[in-house]
Every structure is written in C-alpha cells, then in structure tokens.
Image: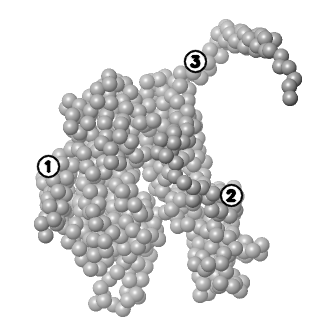
Amino acid sequence: MGRECNKVWRWLLVWAGCLVMSSHLSAAPVEEHPEIRVIIDVSGSMRRNDPDQLAAEALDLLVALVPSGARAGVWTFGERAANPLPPSPVNPEWRGRARALAPLLVDYQQYTDIESAILEAAAGEPGEGQRHLVLLTDGMIDLPDWRGRKPAVDQASRAALLDDHGPRLVEDGVVVHAIAFSQEADLELIERLAQMTGGLSAAVVDPGALLGAFTDIVDRIFPSDRVPVTDQRFLIEPGLRGFTALLFRGEEPVTLVAPDGTRYSADSPPEGAEWRSESRYDLVHVPNPQPGQWRLEGAPSQDSRITVESPLSLQMTELPATLYLGFEMPVEAWLARDGEVVAADELPAHLRLNAELHDAAGSVQSAVGLRQQEERFVGMLPAPALTGTAQFVVRAEGQGFRRQRVQPVNTLPAVSARHDETNQRVLLEAEHPALDRDNTRLYGQLQGVHLAAEPVAERRWSIPLPELDMALSVPLILRGEVTLEGETHELHLPRLMLFPSVDTAIDRVDASPALEVTRFHEELAPVRESRGASRTPLPEPVERIIQQIQELPAVAQERWREWHPLLVNPLEAAMQDPRKAWLLAAGLLLVLLIGWRKSLRQRRARPREEPHV
C-alpha cells in the first residue's frame, strides 16, 4: 500500500511541475482555441498493459504542451464514464484542480464501455466550436453481462458507434484522435473512428512510443514553428523571443551547448530558463536565447523537437489527417509576420521552400520543391508509397532563416479488403471519400485468374472466389481504376492473403494493417530471411562507426540544403548579368585548363614499370 501511495504522490508532483511550465510552452499565441478532451481507459487490463503508469506521464506531457487559454477537460472510463475535470480554460485554477487527478488513473474497473465514454465526452451545445477527443485505450468494447447477451451486445455497441454516432460526430464538429495502447485493442475501430472524423490514429506497442503519439496529436491540434535539428545541432536566429526543447532521451542526461560553448543541464539551466527532467524526456524553455548554432548532447531521439517563438512564422494550409495511396496532395505555404502575410518583396533573401512526407522511421517517402507565386509557395506532393503513421514536413530556408512545420498524418489504402471465408468472397470498401460505384472499377488476380468485383452498395464491392484449398495460403492481387474530374487513374492496392493462418503458403507476403508500415512497392518480391539474421554482433565501436557511415548521405543532403542558397543563388544572379556570366565562364575554363595541364604532367612523370614475373 505504501508503494502505491508513493507512486501517486510522485505523479502528483510531476503533474504540478508540468502545469507550472505549461504557461511558457506555447510556441505562439493561439488565435482560436479548439477544445481538447482527453479520455483515458481505466479498465482492469490497463493494470497489466501499463504497469509503470505511462498513461499518467503522457497526460502530464499533453497538459504541459496545451497553450494557455485553450479549453481542456479529462474523462476516465471503464464500466462507466466519469468527468473528473470538466472542460474549462487552462489557467491556474484549472491546473490546481488537475493536481487531484492522478489517483483516479489507477482506479481500475472491470469492463470497457468505449461507446458511452465517447458520447459523454463529445456532448456539447450546438455551435460550441470544434472539439478534439483524445482516446487512449488498451482493449475492445466489453460490456457487463447485465447489458445483454455476449458477444452480440458488444458487437451492437461497436456497430452503433461507427454507423450511427460516427456521422453525427462529424456533423457536430467532433474530431476523434485514438491511440491503441496494446495489441489487444480494436485497431480497426479506432482507425475508422479517426478516419471518418478527421483525426489521427496510432497503434502503440512500445510503451515508450506513447509519449510520441500524444505529442503528434498536440502538433495536429496546436501547430507551431520549429527549427530543424541536424546532426544534433540547430540554428537560432537573432530576434527570437525564445525556444522550447522537448527532448525524448534514453539513459544519458541531456546537455544543451550554447553557441559560445557554455554547457547547460537540468542542474544548471540557462539564466531565466525552466528545465523539467522526467524519466523519458526533458522539457526546456529558454527565453531570449543566444543567437547562433546550438548543440545537443545525450543522443535524444528523432521525436525530439525545438519550437520557437518569433514574429516571423511559417504558415501552411492544413493537410487532411488521412492521406491515401495513389493520390497526390496540393500544398500551399507562406510566411507571416505577426499574423499578416509577408509581401513578396519583403521575404528573406534566397528563400526556398520544399515539402516532404516522412515515414515512421524518418525516411523521405515523397518530396516536392514549392514554386513561388507572389507571396505564396505552391506545389503538388507525390502520392505516398507506404501506409501507416507519417509526418508531413514543410521546410523554409533562406539567408539566416530556417523554419519547418510538421503535420502528423495517417496514410491508408484507398480501398480496404476483407476475406469473408464463410461466403467464399472478398469484401471491398472505399476508404477514400471520393470513390464510389460510379467512378471506380475494381478487380483481383488469383493465381493468374482475373476476378471482377461486383458493386453491392454505394461504396462497397464483392469479389466471388472459386473453390480454394483451405490448407493453402494464397495471395489475391487487387487492382482498380478510378475516374475523377475526367482523368482515369490506376489504383495499386495491397495484396490480401487468403487463409493467412495456415502453415503452407504460396507467398508469405501479405497486407499488414493500415496502422503499420508496409512497403507496397516491394510487394511482388517474396520475403526472404535476412542473411545477417544470425550474425555475431559487432563490437560497439564498430557498430557506431557503421551507423555513422550509414547516416552520411542524410547528413550530406542536409549540408547541401544549408549551402544551396549561398552557392546556387549567386550563380543564378550572375547569369542574369552578361558581363558577370562571361567572367564566370572564363574562370571555369581557366580552372579546367589548369586541371588538364596538371594531369598531363603527372602522366609524363609517371615512372615506367619493368615487366616481371
């Protein structure tokens, strides 16, 4: 009992510290505050799936990142839903009431009523504005026996949530962001809820990734300017009001090194700074920072970010929370000063903008350079190649100016597929909102045989299957065509494994759930066991050298981004002046002649080798 009390008091102290800092953590004042309502699962399975009470730590972080003035509230649910902290403005009074919530997060209940929790948290008066629900659950709908016969009562609650309540949530301006905290959670349910309402969904298997999932949702609701972090370095320009560093770390403590070489830590923060060090992250706010290049020590993870407060900010049109394979996306971005769009003739020198889509591992899926149209920059982002969680990044770089905006997104197939073994058919359903039976034609290929899909509803199709050996797992290749705005596009969909649970398989490659990352451009290649799967581990110094070598291309690309405006733009300007262009051409010709002459001399001076045995 004493150990449990210590845990509760520890979380109370953590909560209080984060609340004190929260007034400083808004990267910019928020003009219109959306309302955020957090719903935390306290069913009995959370005792097993969250033994370290990371749900409380994630809630602490979310509360710390919510800007002052925004409205926020907290719900808990198991067999019944409760609202210990009703929605109200984030201010000292609200923070004081939040201090008493930690014990409620370990008040476990036996059942899991997700439907009632969402309906109660979403309730509000018409015209209240957009409400963001953040659902954290580790299970499936599991109602008590007195509610009806199981599993029918659970299935009816699930169907009502998706088919009846989901469309009403959209009409009422409610966005559902959902995090599955274990493999036991209903991944399809939270994914569909988030997709239909315009929210984010994430499957979190590693408890350490839970904090990253929460910060992604905060980034989605309260976007802010960041500065890029490259090789654990970031540039702070003159005139910034301050920066906030959220640093996810391992066992090593984090150290901030200022441009003048001064080293700062949790024990010795910069003057006027606030530094909060938790078990998995450090949260640092530095007002009026020293301009120049700062450095990080302690190997923070790639989820770390540096947000800045500045009159000059990067803005962009909001991207949908869900992108679809095979569909490109228009992008528009601009700079604003104190909320007003910066005119074209007042933009920073040599300004260039580009947009990228990063997968969960941080690799670039697709990218496009944005072309300038007066004060705006526009482009078309190529279609994503992978499903799963992703980061959409717009980066602006000019002389003495670097900014980026990040919008977390989910990428899904345009059409989902499910094998109905009982009726020997495959059921297809349009996920992309623009697809229907009138503009979309779907078909499959099963062992070389063409199978046409027949429409069974406005956005659903069925593919009848021939007699199959249930002891053999076979892949069904899915393809399609869609006609939108007079243009026909080919749809490449993930293959569907029929009878995937059997041991004998023709092809072991199958379509993973949409919340996981699958490389569909490699789908025709069979999966082979890696040759290095059983290799002897290398010594740690050798592994570190290999890792640094593997990171060289990314570092070189980043360095090119930094020097590109300084090298290319003067050349382009010189080419506009005929006299400068002639001087440049003459200089290049002279360099080539000197190089050729030096090479010729080396050839003549090379000693002749005598033949030998």
Q: Amino acid at mark 1?
A: Pro
Pointer 3: what residue? 570
Q: Which mark is residue 272?
A: none
- Front-lying residue, 247 or 132: 247
Question: Mark 2 touching mark 3, by CB under 8 A?
Answer: no
Compared across the picture, whether 224 is left or right of 18 comes to right
Looking at the picture, the colour scheme in use is one colour
Pointer 2: what residue? 489
The residue mark sitting in front, 1 or 2, is 1
Residue 486 seen from this side = no
Pointer 1: what residue? 92
Question: Which residue does the image show at 57% across and 48% down from the upper left?
Answer: 365
Give the vertical position of 440 relative to 266 (above or below).
below
Neighbor class of circle 3 (other Cα within 10 Å; few <14, some 14-19, many 20+) is few
Q: Position of residue 484 (x, y in %)?
A: 64, 58
Give the vertical position of 606 relative to 558 (above or below).
above
Of labels 1 and 3, earlier in sequence is 1
Of labels 2 and 3, earlier in sequence is 2
